[in-house]
Amino acid sequence: MNNNSKNIVMCFSAHPDDEVLGCGGTIAKYSLEGHKVSILILATGLTSRKNTNDLSIKALRDESIKSSKIMGANSITFENFPDNMMDTVPLLDVVKKIESFIKKKKIEIIFTHNHDDLNIDHSVVNKAVITACRPIEKKINVYACEILSSSEWNFDSDDTFKPNTFIDIGETIKKKIKAMECYKSEIRNFPHPRSIEGIKNLSKLRGSQSNLNYAEAFRLIISIFSENKVP
C-alpha cells in the first residue's frame, strides 16, 4: 500500500456482506489513510431465499449502508442481478456495469472475488472484473479476496485460494467486526465460519502467516501501474 499518494479503490462484491468478509479491514485501513474507497454490490443477496420481497431487500441494503459507513467507504452502490443465478445473465451485462464504474471513478486498485469460490455468483463477478480490466488504456491492480463460507467450502476444487499478498489490519480488525455485526440477517453463531469468532480466527491465521497479529489475505491477479503510481 503506497502511503505517499492517494489511490482510488473499488470493491466489486457479489452480495451484501462479501465486502466486509473479504476486505473489510483493508477498506477501513485505506479509508483511514485518506484514500477514496467505493463499493459495488452486484446481486440482491436474497432472491434465492424464501419469503423475499422488496422490504427485505431494502432492509439488507440498509445494513450494507450502515456497514460501509463504519468502514469509512466513500460510496456504496447496488445492482439487481439475481442472487445465486448470475450465471444465467449474459456475462457482457455484468462486464458493462463494472467497466462503467472503472471509467467513471478512474479506479486504480480493485478487490473482488476468487474465481474458484463455491458460490457461482462469486465466480461470475471475478470473470467479469478480469474481463473489464483488460490492459487497454488502464493502469490497474486487481486482487482476489477470500470469503468465509465460500472460498474454503469448495472441497472438490484443485485450485483452492492461495494468497500472495497480506495486509495488516491490526488497527482495523475491530471496525471489520463492527461492520459485520450490522448484517443481522447474515451473521451466524460459532462454529459457523461467518461468525465473529470465525472472522477473528481467519484474521489471526493470515496474520500468523505474515508475522502480523491480524491480516487479510489476497491473491494478486493483475498488476499494471504507471511510473508515478505503485500499489
Image (cartoon, grey):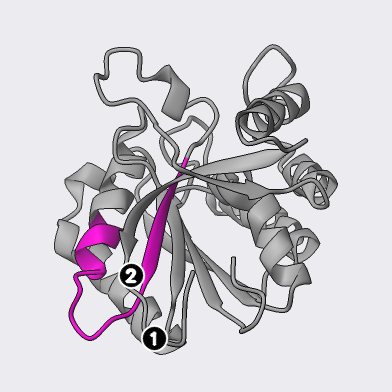
Residue 218 spot, x, y in % from top left:
48, 45
Mark 2 crowd level (few <14, some 14–19, many ≥20, 10 Å Cα):
many
Label 2: state its secondary structure.
Answer: helix
Name the residue located 70 percent from the left edge and 51 percent from the top edge: 25
Residue 217 spot, x, y in % from top left:
54, 41
- Is residue 59 at least partly visible in the picture? no
Instruction: Inspect the magenta stretch and tell me whether residue 106 lies in it.
Output: no
Residue 224 spot, x, y in % from top left:
31, 72
Residue 78 spot, x, y in % from top left:
50, 65
Q: How many marks?
A: 2
- Quarter residue 161 falls in: top left
Name the foreground residue: 149 vs 62. 149
Q: Give whichever of discs 1 and 2 has the lower sequence position.
A: 2
Q: CA distance from mark 1 to mark 2?
A: 25 Å
Q: Amino acid at mark 1?
A: Glu
The label shown at residue 227 is: 1
Residue assigned mark 2:
98
Name the residue located 39 percent from the left edge and 66 percent from the top edge: 141
Instruction: Inspect the magenta stretch and tell me whether residue 132 lies in it.
Output: yes
| For residue 225, above or below residue 191 | below
| Region in magenta | 128-145
Using residue 86 as the reference point, say whether residue 88 is left or right of it: left
Using residue 167 as the reference point, say whether residue 11 is left or right of it: left
Name the foreground residue: 26 vs 44. 26
The label shown at residue 16 is: none
